[in-house]
Amino acid sequence: MKVTDALFIFGLVILAILAWLFIPVWMIRRSIPKVIKIFQKRNAIGIQNAKTVEELGLQPKSMWQRMFSRRDYKPKALQLLIQLNVVQMTEDGKVYITDDSLASATWLKLKK
């Protein structure tokens, strides 16, 4: 094996590791505006209009559904938004957004 072959294989391995680490992060960031639009479309704005995750269609897919469809990153994006306090949760588990929480999350770079 030549040195150039070894370097090429090493480069491919590094590239594969970087893809394995960064593609999910990129897909979750790409799903964040979609999740926000779902909240807006279903009028889950404000505590009085809070909806369940199932009503919004953001529940994780079952094992059977995941076997036959593409990976859905929206549930992970929702969890991230909850952790960052962009999406609020009521005591009974319903979720909602507020205009203030969206305004404070300028890093989202939402397209209007």
Image (cartoon, rainbow, N blue to C red):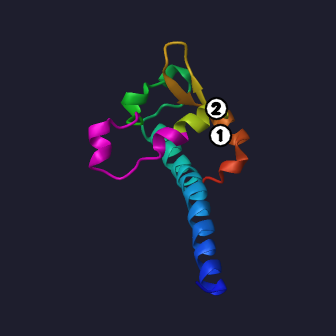
The residue that appears at 44% across and 25% down in the rendered structure is: 51
Separation (CA) of disc 1 from disc 2: 14 Å
Work out which quarter of the rendered image holds the N terminus and state it. bottom right
x then y, percent, for residue 69: 30, 50
The question of residue 62 being in magenta is answered with yes
The question of residue 30 being in magenta is answered with no
Decide if residue 40 is on the left or right side of residue 18.
left
x then y, percent, for residue 33: 54, 49
Q: Which residue is mark 2?
A: 83
Task: Give the amino acid at mark 2.
Answer: Gln
Q: Earlier in the sequence, mark 1 or mark 2?
A: 2
Furthest-top residue in view? 91
x then y, percent, for residue 55: 37, 29
Residue 2's image quarter?
Answer: bottom right
The residue that appears at 49% across and 18% down in the rendered structure is: 93
Residue 53 is labelled as: none
Furthest-front residue in view? 1
Residue 41's image quarter?
Answer: top left
What span is colored magenta in the figure? 59-77
The residue tagged with tag 1: helix, strand or loop? helix
The residue that appears at 32% across and 44% down in the rendered structure is: 66
Q: Which residue is mark 1?
A: 102
